[in-house]
Amino acid sequence: MTSAVMPTYARAPVAFVKGEGCRLTARDGRTFLDFAAGIAVCALGHAHPRLVAALHEQAQRLWHCSNLFEVEHQESVAAALARLTFGELVFFANSGAEANECAIKIARRHHAAAGHPGRYRVLAFKGSFHGRTLATLAAAGNPKNLDGFGPVVDGFDHAPYGDLAAATAAVGPHTAAILVEPIQGEGGIKVPDPAFLKGLRALADKTGALLMFDEVQCGMGRSGALFAHQRVGVAPDVMTVAKGLAGGFPVAACVATRKAAAAMTAGSHASTFGGNPLAMRVAIEVLAIVAEPAFLARVAQAGQVLAAGLDALVARHPHLYAERRGVGLMQGLRCTLDPGTMADRLRDAGLLIAPAQDHVIRLVPPLIVSDAEIEEALLILDAVARSALKAA
Ligand SMILES: *Cc1c(COP(=O)(O)O)cnc(C)c1O
């Protein structure tokens, strides 16, 4: 049967019909241990009772309300994000790309309002991912994703990730902002030296550029801190959040200081669905759970268990697992086979992972993963490495 869905994805031949915690059940009855979590989205696993109840309760009252009116729960989510971070003002969107669009617009308007409309360029980094809109594609600058889509949106410069000297050289009088993932996700789970982020903060302070962190993937508890930059003790002027924010209900946020966003006045930006009551109600619940210090401490502990197990696999099976990278429950394994093949083999053995660039497979389980489930995933990774050795 031919499909009417536009074939923009290379989909694996499996359809899930039910999820519970860290497990998914497919239409044919097979069950899988989910260490992909919708690509770091299902922070509290599948069908978390508190999220189900919150969504259900809100669905019975009000689904949608235009931003022409006050939208219930937006104030609560914005206040929570402000209380838990450097931020003071929040714009709600529906996807990571849209939150980054908002960040880019904030940067341009910030300088335009100060009388410097020519100061519009954003310095971003190679190997990053910021979304699939035309501006966020230009920000990441990945030629593969830009191919065939016409003129690249102007206003983006690039430096190698982790290279502070190159970043310093690339910042000029036209630089409005520096946009960076505190940990690169799609790029292959790259954790920079803390000195890199600290240096970018100093560079922004010196030049008047805004420092903008894309925490769409590494935020919402994944690193063991609520936001990855908090581990390093470097606060940005603007931060984008999405994936885990409502545990799988689509929502995103662009969090800024009052100063950075001072020019974002009424009419300057908008979204029909952004901050929808359903999304807000679920986000309140996710934030209440994930921001608890005991919850984050458990994420860090689970991350250590996973990292130690992965290190042991690298030591035991260097023919397949070349290197482990990551912090908390954002772990990557660089493999000698391509990530797509690895995804197929692991899935056949009952484990879901998310491929990334640089020959890396991502292990980004729900943050509620148990030690027993981590052990089970490690056993599957071990078994796949042993059968790869036999086949070779
Ligand atoms: C996934 C991702 C995005 C894009 O999010 P969408 O919701 O797909 O638009 C942006 N930045 C980072 C770091 C991401 O991981």
Image (spheres, rainbow, N blue to C red):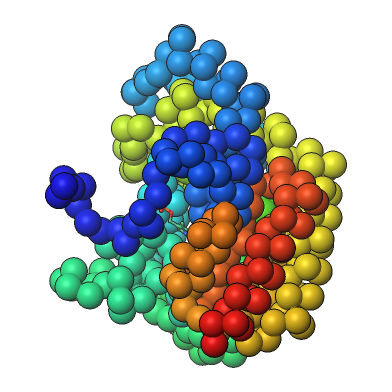
Q: Residue at x 58, y 30 (%)?
A: 47
Q: Position of residue 53 (x, y in %)?
A: 59, 18
Q: Position of residue 213 (x, y in %)?
A: 56, 61
Residue 346 or 202: which is nearer the viewer?
A: 346
Residue 360 or 113: which is nearer the viewer?
A: 360
Whether residue 172 sits left or right of residue 304 in the image: it is left
Residue 5 or 182: which is nearer the viewer?
A: 5
Please state, as top left, top right, bottom left or bottom right, where the C terminus lies in the image: bottom right
Q: Is residue 276 above or below residue 81?
A: above
Q: Position of residue 214 (x, y in %)?
A: 53, 60
Q: Image quadrant of ligand 1?
A: bottom left
Q: Position of residue 198 (x, y in %)?
A: 70, 73
Whether residue 282 sits left or right of residue 157 in the image: it is right
Whether residue 53 sits left or right of residue 144 in the image: it is right
Residue 36 appears in the rendering: yes
Residue 259 appears in the rendering: no
Q: Residue at x 75, y 81 (%)?
A: 316
